[in-house]
Image: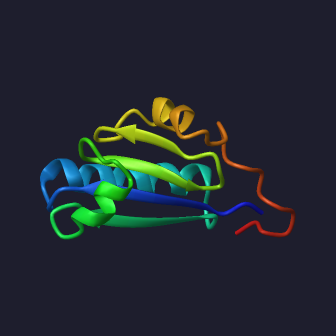
Amino acid sequence: MTTYFFRLFVFGQTERSVAAQANLRMLCESLLPGRYRVEVVDVAEHPDVADQERVLATPMVVRMAPLPRYRVIGDLSDHRRMATALGLPEEAPPTPLGDEA
């Protein structure tokens, strides 16, 4: 199964940064349960990483893997639009047989 890796760029722990983190994690849990990793980078603390990724505004998420890379800027509150922009599957994969709770 493919594992997705996202890098979320924020500037401090502002309300907008916290909302973006929550929105990204909520989207990943609904579409990619157990198949994702999120790394949060504060551009104030790591400007070199932000420069390397050409971060122009925050919050911004970059889908690092699988390739190709996709970028979305904003608080990530529109989950359908964000899923499309990040190239994610439109619905959660079916639960394998025998995994019922």
58 sits to left or right of 98: left
**Way the structure is coloured:** rainbow
Rendering quarter of residue 99: bottom right
Residue 59 percent across, percent down from the top left = 27, 47
**What residue is rendered at 85% in x and 69% in y?**
98
**What residue is rendered at 48% in x and 48% in y?**
27
Above or below, 4 against 16 in this view is: below
Above or below, 52 against 56 in this view is: below
Rendering quarter of residue 97: bottom right
89 sits to left or right of 53: right
Judge by depth and name the residue closer to the eye, 93 or 44. Answer: 44
Above or below, 85 against 53 in this view is: above
Residue 80 percent across, percent down from the top left = 50, 32
Judge by depth and name the residue closer to the eye, 7 or 81. Answer: 7
Residue 7 percent across, percent down from the top left = 42, 59
**What residue is rendered at 40% in x and 49% in y?**
61
**The C terminus - image quarter:** bottom right
Judge by depth and name the residue closer to the eye, 69 or 99. Answer: 69
Residue 14 percent across, percent down from the top left = 12, 55
**What residue is rendered at 29% in x and 38% in y?**
74
Q: Residue lying farthest right?
A: 97
**The N terminus - image quarter:** bottom right
**Figure label count:** 0
